[in-house]
């Protein structure tokens, strides 16, 4: 049986003590400690970044020579570090890609998504919504991730999980499925991690 759901659990208290904006900070902390995805000087995209727990950890990891861009449909309290930039954007909006390019037009070293849909309580609907958000994150990793870059997306385990994992495998040399320690007991969520983005194939010259 999973860990029982306790809203003010150990990680909640620990986050409060450590001045972290969300207990989820411990999840990305575990992920980047297990896999060398985020280094000093890296440029990282954090999707679904509010209230900013991931951003706090990612900011420490990239340092002032790096850059972290966090976007969410809800506003994120600004960060004091100038290399952490946030914007209110819906990743599923038609103009999202253009707006993202206005924020940063170069490649990313890591595309990280902790996006989660508003849950309806209907399992199949929630899984499909979660996968749609994760699918958009993968599309961005494909379009904007540099060769060798990393990818992380939270998904609710469901019917199309294997298919999504295979889509990541096509783009990254290695794929891991991780359920971080700080994940709540009853949660169906896991993180899919793509390591070392393959270089895009160049079209053959005629
Ligand atoms: C679990 S929370 C993220 C917590 C965050 N990683 C942190 O550490 O503070 C999931 C977030 O996904 C965002 N989200 C859901 N749909 C989105 C969309 N279409 N575009 C951008 N963000 C979205 C939600 O607003 C919510 O803030």
Image (cartoon, rainbow, N blue to C red):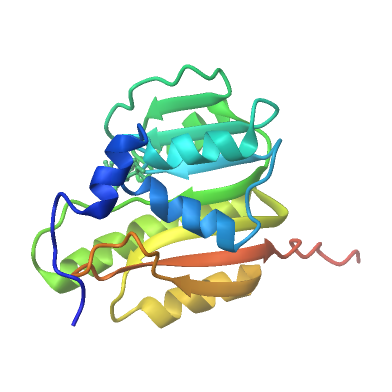
- Number of numbered discs: 0
> In this rendering, would 145 be left or right of 19?
right
Quarter of the view holding residue 161: bottom left
Tell me which residue sits at (44%, 21%) in the image: 79
Q: Is residue 80 above or below residue 178?
A: above
> Is there any visible trace of residue 22 in the rendered image?
no
Quarter of the view holding residue 102: top right
Tell me which residue sits at (53%, 73%) in the image: 176
Viewer-side residue, 130 vs 38: 38
Q: Specify the farthest residue to the left.
A: 121
Looking at the picture, how far across and down is residue 20, in whole percent?
36, 36
> In this rendering, would 1 be left or right of 144?
left
Looking at the picture, how far across and down is residue 192, in whole percent?
47, 67
Ligand 1 visible in quadrant:
top left
Viewer-side residue, 10 vs 205: 10
Tell me which residue sits at (50%, 25%) in the image: 85
Tell me which residue sits at (34%, 78%) in the image: 160
Looking at the picture, how far across and down is residue 97, in whole percent?
49, 39
Q: Is residue 74 above or below residue 12?
A: above
Q: Is residue 38 above or below residue 90?
A: below
Q: Quadrant of the N terminus?
A: bottom left
Q: Quadrant of the C terminus?
A: bottom right
> Is there any visible trace of residue 74 in the rendered image?
yes
């Amino acid at each position: 049986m999973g860990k029982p759901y306790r809203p003010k659990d150990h990680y909640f208290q620990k986050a409060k003590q450590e001045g972290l904006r969300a207990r989820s900070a411990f999840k990305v902390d575990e992920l980047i400690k297990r896999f060398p995805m985020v280094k000093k000087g890296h440029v990282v995209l954090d999707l679904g970044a509010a209230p900013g727990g991931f951003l706090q950890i990612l900011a420490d990891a990239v340092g002032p020579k790096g850059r972290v861009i966090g976007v969410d449909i809800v506003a994120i309290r600004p960060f004091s570090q100038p290399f952490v930039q946030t914007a209110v954007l819906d990743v599923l909006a038609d103009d999202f890609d253009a707006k993202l390019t206005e924020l940063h037009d170069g490649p990313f070293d890591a595309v990280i998504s902790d996006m989660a849909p508003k849950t309806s309580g209907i399992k199949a609907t929630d899984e499909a919504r979660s996968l749609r958000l994760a699918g958009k994150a993968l599309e961005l990793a494909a379009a904007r991730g540099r060769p060798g870059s990393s990818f992380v997306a939270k998904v609710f385990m469901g019917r199309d999980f294997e298919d999504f994992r295979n889509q990541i495998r096509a783009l990254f040399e290695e794929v891991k499925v991780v359920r971080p320690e700080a994940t709540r007991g009853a949660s169906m969520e896991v993180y899919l991690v793509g390591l070392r983005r393959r270089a895009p194939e160049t079209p053959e010259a005629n």
